[in-house]
């Protein structure tokens, strides 16, 4: 990861953060699956598209491969919101290209936000996945906070979820996020998401589980239910509202709340969230899939 920008004015809409190429081989797929503790046969055998596919969000953190879009104040920086649009499957063994750039900047209260967008492009030029990562940075003049994670507006914020009538409730996925999952998902290098020393250097009391882990677990829940209708046509838009610390348990939730025609198919709109056993919601938002 490269060094953050020297000044906040160096980060502007249109800033190019680079193109990269990868072979999405079976080793990468297996490491991703170990990071979530999932075993879906479509990733190693036949899929709805014939050949095996990769998890749709296997390049979930592409924007973090280059840090030249970070603002200078890195103490207590937080992943605030995430959006993904899925257009086509990525096949196992396929060579893909990615392109990332700054798409938006805005401010809220004591924080500056930078939105970095990523595209994953297949070997034949098709767009497979688009992601938009909203990262927040404390303004230099923001006062230090005590008794909670620096930068969060309130500790353990509460949210109302699951109140809207549901047409269908999907089976949830529960995981206790231990050191091995953290390293597989956020490694191999040491960082705030898998190493306590690195986390403390950036103002966190211990290892903070990467927000993308909960998001990718939600994506796997939706893949299990909708298959091709998630991998080709899925949408996800969530806010990361409370931290998950290494060693804590999380459970995904997804409920179909409405459906609308889309050609000969139906587009399902879902309420989604992820929470801890004590009811603390860690991510909340919406998803869509077709069937």
Image: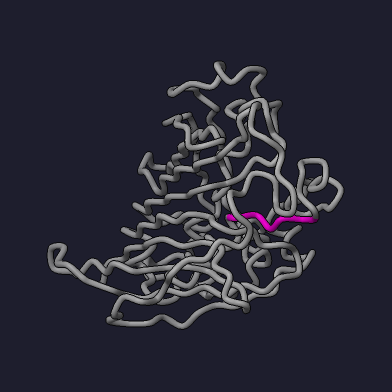
Compared to residue 243, the image places residue 111 above or below, namely above
Front residue (pair 146, 182): 146
Give the percent coordinates (x, y) of residue 210. Answer: 65, 54
Residue 208 is one of the magenta-drawn residues = yes
Which color mode does the image show? one colour
Front residue (pair 87, 256): 256
In the rendered structure, the answer to whether residue 9 lies left or right of residue 73 reads left
Let me know if residue 47 appears in the view: yes
Give the percent coordinates (x, y) of residue 233. Answer: 31, 58
Q: Main secondary structure of the magenta part?
A: loop
Rendered-image quadrant of the C terminus:
bottom left
Total number of numbered discs in the rendering: 0
Residue 185: image quadrant is bottom right
In the rendered structure, the answer to whether residue 268 lies left or right of residue 11 reads left
Let me know if residue 190 appears in the view: no
Compared to residue 139, the image places residue 56 above or below, namely below
Kindly identify the residue that appears in the image at 71 percent across and 70 percent down: 248
Residue 78: image quadrant is top right
Residue 244 is one of the magenta-drawn residues = no
Front residue (pair 127, 78): 78
Compared to residue 282, the image places residue 74 above or below, namely above
Kindly identify the residue that appears in the image at 40 percent across and 76 percent down: 162
In the rendered structure, the answer to whether residue 260 lies left or right of residue 195 reads left
* Magenta residues, start to end: 206-211
Q: Residue furthest right?
A: 197
Give the percent coordinates (x, y) of residue 261. Answer: 14, 67
Residue 63: image quadrant is top right
Kindly identify the residue that appears in the image at 54 percent across and 67 percent down: 281
Give the percent coordinates (x, y) of residue 241. Answer: 54, 57
Kindly identify the residue that appears in the image at 52 percent across and 58 percent down: 92
Rendered-image quadrant of the N terminus:
top right
């Amino acid at each position: 990861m490269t060094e953050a920008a020297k000044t906040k004015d160096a980060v502007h809409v249109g800033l190019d953060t680079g193109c990269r190429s990868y072979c999405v081989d079976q080793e990468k797929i297996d490491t991703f699956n170990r990071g979530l503790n999932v075993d879906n046969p479509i990733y190693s055998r036949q899929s709805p598209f014939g050949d095996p596919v990769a998890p749709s969000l296997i390049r979930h953190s592409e924007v973090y491969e280059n840090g030249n879009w970070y603002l200078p104040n890195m103490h207590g920086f937080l992943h605030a919101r995430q959006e993904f649009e899925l257009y086509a499957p990525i096949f196992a063994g396929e060579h893909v290209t990615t392109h990332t750039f700054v798409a938006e900047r805005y401010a809220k209260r004591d924080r500056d936000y930078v939105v970095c967008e990523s595209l994953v492009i297949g070997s034949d030029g098709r767009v497979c996945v688009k992601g938009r990562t909203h990262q927040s940075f404390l303004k230099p003049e923001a006062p230090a906070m005590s008794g909670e994670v620096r930068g969060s507006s309130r500790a353990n914020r509460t949210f109302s979820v699951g109140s809207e009538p549901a047409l269908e409730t999907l089976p949830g996925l529960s995981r206790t996020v231990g050191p091995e999952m953290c390293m597989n998902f956020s490694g191999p290098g040491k960082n705030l998401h898998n190493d306590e020393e690195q986390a403390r250097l950036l103002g966190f009391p211990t290892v903070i589980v990467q927000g993308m882990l909960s998001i990718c677990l939600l994506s796997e829940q939706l893949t299990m239910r909708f298959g091709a209708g998630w991998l080709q046509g899925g949408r996800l838009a969530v806010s990361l509202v409370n931290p998950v610390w290494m060693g804590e348990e999380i459970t995904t939730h997804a409920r179909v709340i409405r459906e609308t025609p889309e050609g000969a198919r139906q587009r399902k709109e879902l309420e989604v969230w992820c929470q801890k056993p004590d009811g603390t919601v860690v991510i909340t938002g919406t998803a869509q899939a077709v069937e």
